[in-house]
Image (cartoon, rainbow, N blue to C red):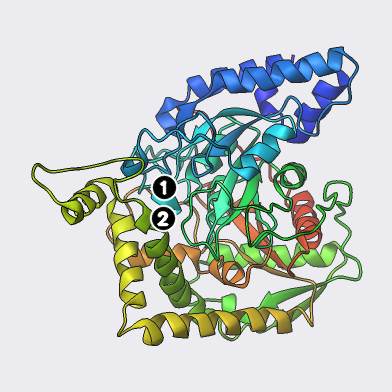
């Protein structure tokens, strides 16, 4: 019999529906794989009983002749940024250690309503702040990929590093991620999987631990484009509990998938040719352009003149919102409380936050508090918001000339853990290609395009117009079919 853990979401769904295997067999196979992969540190909490309960419900429904739910029999990993009722939720931070939510996030509830089961809660950069999954309070996630003849552990990308590692290593057929400035797309590129950040507001933020509220967006990470489309359909939808949620019907993205791009125009932004870009990234981008042309698209060069200001603007806006959002962690209501003997309220706040927040979180809170302070608000925060508006306008003008944009996802393949930790600016530059779409709230997807000279995955990014997830998925499918990417990491863990 086929190793069930080699199957993706569509294959598991169809196999359970057709009676090729039982949902419980799938859940047991993935639970066993998760249990044997502690060396990757992808899971913070394992919930095998949740996966088995959902599987048994799917098998019972099929035995009773009922119509199966869209994700019946499919077990997934849940990024530990989504509140899960009765299951510890920490955002990979000591300040939330031991917190067990009495409620369920809307995105996770939507997935359970669709029949999915939970294999466990996935590790991440603390409060989703990071590009390498090295800021987690519970240890680094390790990429399943290795350079040949080199045992140095590699970064799985961040912040959704637990999700990217779980999917890439075959521990889960799909996983949830969140993307504030690239945290779905960059880890997907690093580990040779697919991931899409939908239009801002497509997926509810309710019950998702906040980093930067005007940027945070949930999305799926899976082995291929079809699986992402299936999972996104289940995750998305209007939620009255989220004021930024879009009151729109969820399209049937899977049914409308098409790799035929005849009549479409693909834009290539000239500003994304940054100084010092590795030749391999440049070559992959050109290969992607050729694939788009082969799929029937017309290639046009477009300009996004304010691109160079995107990263500085992002690293003002996101920390500013983080400093506001993270003020709720004060040691009073939930989570960690550090109360030195004889301490007053202010002392307790300071001690709790000093002990509970990691260095990167503290750095961003400090930056955010600084740019929001009275003397600097107009000089930094107001200016950054103006730049954000200009970046969004750049995209609008570019989309007058094309349907989607094609860029690299990240400026390099995965780097070694520890390689960039001492230089925050070098780490922040990982987001140079992903941040602009986040600032504009646009849908964007990473798909694997090939391998670098060391045999590590490289990704290509498709950026679409607001609400045009279908266009993004279709262009990504065209790349996927032509790239023929089948590389998988060799198990060493």
Q: Indicate left or right for 306 with 100 as reference.
A: right
> Residue at 8% of width from left, 45% of height from top?
342
Give x and y (percent) for residue 141. Answer: 42, 39
Tags 2 and 1 touching, CB below 8 Å? yes
Q: What whole-number distance in Å separates the C-alpha atoms at marks 2 and 1? A: 6 Å
| Quadrant assignment, res 201 | bottom right
Q: Indicate left or right for 475 with 326 as reference.
A: right
Q: SS at mark 2?
A: loop
Q: SS at mark 1?
A: loop
Q: Indicate left or right for 214 with 196 as reference.
A: left
Dot 1, crowdedness within 10 Å: few (<14), some or many (≥20)? many
> Residue at 38% of width from left, 87% of height from top?
379
Q: Is residue 31 visible?
A: yes
Identify the residue position indicated by label 1 in the image. Answer: 133
Give x and y (percent) for residue 409. Answer: 58, 61
Q: Is residue 3 visible?
A: no
Quarter placement of the C terminus: top left
Give x and y (percent) for residue 285. Answer: 65, 66
Give x and y (percent) for residue 302. Answer: 70, 82
Q: Residue furthest left?
A: 342
Pick whichever, 271 or 331, lies toward us: 331
Identify the residue position indicated by label 2 in the image. Answer: 130
Q: Is residue 69 above or below residue 400?
A: above
> Residue at 72% of width from left, 47% of height from top?
232
Pick whichever, 159 or 55, lies toward us: 55
Quarter placement of the N terminus: top right
């Amino acid at each position: 019999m086929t190793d069930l853990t080699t199957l993706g979401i569509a294959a598991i769904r169809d196999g359970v529906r057709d009676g090729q295997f039982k949902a419980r067999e799938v859940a047991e196979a993935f639970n066993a794989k998760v249990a044997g992969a502690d060396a990757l540190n992808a899971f913070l909490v394992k919930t095998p009983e949740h996966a088995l309960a959902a599987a048994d419900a799917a098998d019972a429904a099929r035995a009773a002749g009922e119509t199966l739910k869209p994700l019946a029999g499919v077990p997934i990993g849940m990024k530990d940024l989504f509140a899960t009722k009765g299951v510890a939720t920490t955002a990979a931070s000591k300040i939330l250690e031991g917190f067990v939510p009495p409620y369920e996030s809307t995105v996770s509830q939507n997935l359970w309503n669709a029949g999915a089961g939970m294999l466990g809660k996935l590790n991440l950069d603390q409060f989703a702040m990071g590009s390498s999954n090295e800021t987690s309070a519970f240890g680094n996630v390790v990429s399943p990929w290795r350079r040949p003849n080199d045992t140095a552990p590699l970064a799985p990308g961040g912040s959704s590093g637990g999700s990217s590692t779980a999917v890439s290593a075959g521990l889960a057929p799909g996983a949830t991620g969140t993307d504030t400035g690239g945290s779905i797309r960059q880890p997907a590129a690093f580990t040779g999987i697919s991931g899409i950040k939908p239009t801002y507001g497509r997926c509810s933020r309710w019950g998702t631990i906040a980093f930067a509220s005007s940027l945070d967006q949930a999305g799926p990470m899976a082995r291929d484009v079809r699986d992402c489309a299936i999972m996104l359909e289940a995750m998305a939808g209007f939620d009255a509990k989220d004021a930024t949620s879009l009151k729109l019907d969820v399209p049937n993205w899977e049914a409308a998938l098409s790799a035929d791009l005849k009549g479409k125009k693909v834009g290539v932004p000239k500003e994304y040719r940054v100084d010092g870009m590795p030749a391999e990234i440049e070559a992959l981008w050109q290969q992607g352009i050729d694939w788009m042309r082969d799929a029937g698209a017309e290639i046009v060069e477009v300009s996004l003149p304010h691109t160079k200001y995107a990263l500085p603007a992002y690293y003002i806006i996101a920390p500013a919102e983080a400093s506001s959002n993270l003020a709720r962690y004060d040691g009073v209501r939930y989570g960690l409380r550090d109360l030195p003997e004889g301490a007053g309220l202010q002392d307790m706040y300071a001690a709790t936050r000093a002990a509970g927040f990691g260095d990167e979180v503290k750095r961003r809170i400090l930056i955010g508090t600084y740019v929001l302070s009275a003397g600097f608000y107009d000089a930094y925060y107001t200016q950054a918001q103006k730049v954000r508006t200009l970046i969004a306008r750049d995209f609008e003008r570019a989309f007058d000339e094309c349907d989607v944009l094609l860029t690299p996802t990240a400026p390099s393949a995965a780097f070694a853990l520890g390689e960039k930790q001492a230089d925050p600016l070098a780490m922040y530059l990982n987001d140079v290609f992903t941040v602009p779409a986040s600032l504009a709230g646009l849908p964007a997807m990473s798909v694997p395009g090939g391998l670098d000279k060391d045999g590590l995955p490289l990704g290509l990014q498709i950026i679409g117009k607001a609400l045009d997830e279908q266009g993004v998925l279709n262009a990504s499918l065209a790349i996927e079919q032509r790239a023929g990417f089948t590389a998988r990491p060799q198990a060493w863990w």
